[in-house]
Amino acid sequence: DGGITQSPKYLFRKEGQNVTLSCEQNLNHDAMYWYRQDPGQGLRLIYYSQIVNDFQKGDIAEGYSVSREKKESFPLTVTSAQKNPTAFYLCASSKGGGRGAGELFFGEGSRLTVL
Amino acid sequence: GNSVTQMEGPVTLSEEAFLTINCTYTATGYPSLFWYVQYPGEGLQLLLKATKADDKGSNKGFEATYRKETTSFHLEKGSVQVSDSAVYFCALSLLSNDYKLSFGAGTTVTVRA
């Protein structure tokens, strides 16, 4: 079945450590996204990528980094510079630009807890 | 800037009750509007969408009409079920930058048997 796979589902990190969240899609979508979800705040865009080897900052990119070396993969690294990293992280993909871009397909999310 | 405002939850209903979740938006252009649903422990799924004024999106018994004059996109369902318990998000995207969706804060709906 086609879809988005995020791993790990749960992750614990000590302060000062970097951690990388994996996101893989087999939908052949051009665009991929990372969102952060906090209670009562909806979803906020961290980074997005329209095409391989290209990505742009979203609204809250500070303390995060991404890469897009393959069409299928868009890993997110939460660095020690992120002041409040405990959150639920959602990866998504879409076919690309135009009116279809708003139709996002989401993974099941990764919950990161900093101890 | 572009933003979406949803009615605050949580909303608790009995089965077969009528559900309305209000959503209004602010946008500099002509947005496409969406409702996404998030079931417990899962990611979001697209529920319905509308791309121009007076369009009505519908799916799984839910409906929402794009009202340009009131900048609204309220979600309705005539008879809810326990399985409709979820968090509902209103969202918009602009043609000028379709890659960026702006989401509302989400409304938690609980349906009791």
Image (cartoon, coloured by chain):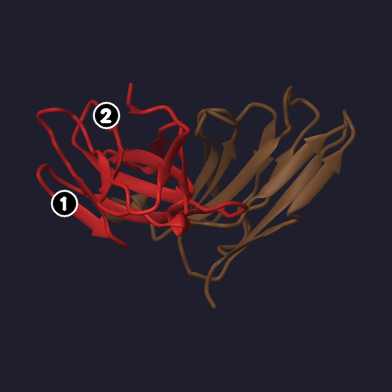
Chain colours: A brown, B red
Instruction: Give residue B56's mark.
Output: 1
Residue B89 sits above or below residue A53 on the image: above
Callout 2 environment at 10 Å: few (<14), some (14 to 19), or many (20+)? Answer: many
Q: Where is mark 2, residue-wise?
A: B24
Q: Residue at x 82, y 38 (%)?
A: A18
User: To which chain does the residue with label 1 belong?
Assistant: B
- Residue B110 left/right relative to A24: left
Q: Position of residue A59 (x, y in %)?
A: 51, 28
The amino acid beneath tag 2 is: Thr
Q: Residue at x 14, y 36 (%)?
A: B67
Q: Position of residue B93 (x, y in %)?
A: 32, 40
Q: Do the residues bearing badges 1 and 2 touch, measured as CB atoms within 8 Å?
A: no
Q: Residue at x 23, y 38 (%)?
A: B73
Quadrant in which the N terminus of chain B appears: top left
- Disc on the earlier residue, 1 or 2: 2
> Within the image, what quadrant is residue B47 found in?
bottom left
Instruction: Give residue A52's mark.
Output: none
- Residue B56 left/right relative to A109: left
Secondary element type, mark 1: strand
Residue B95 visible within the image: no
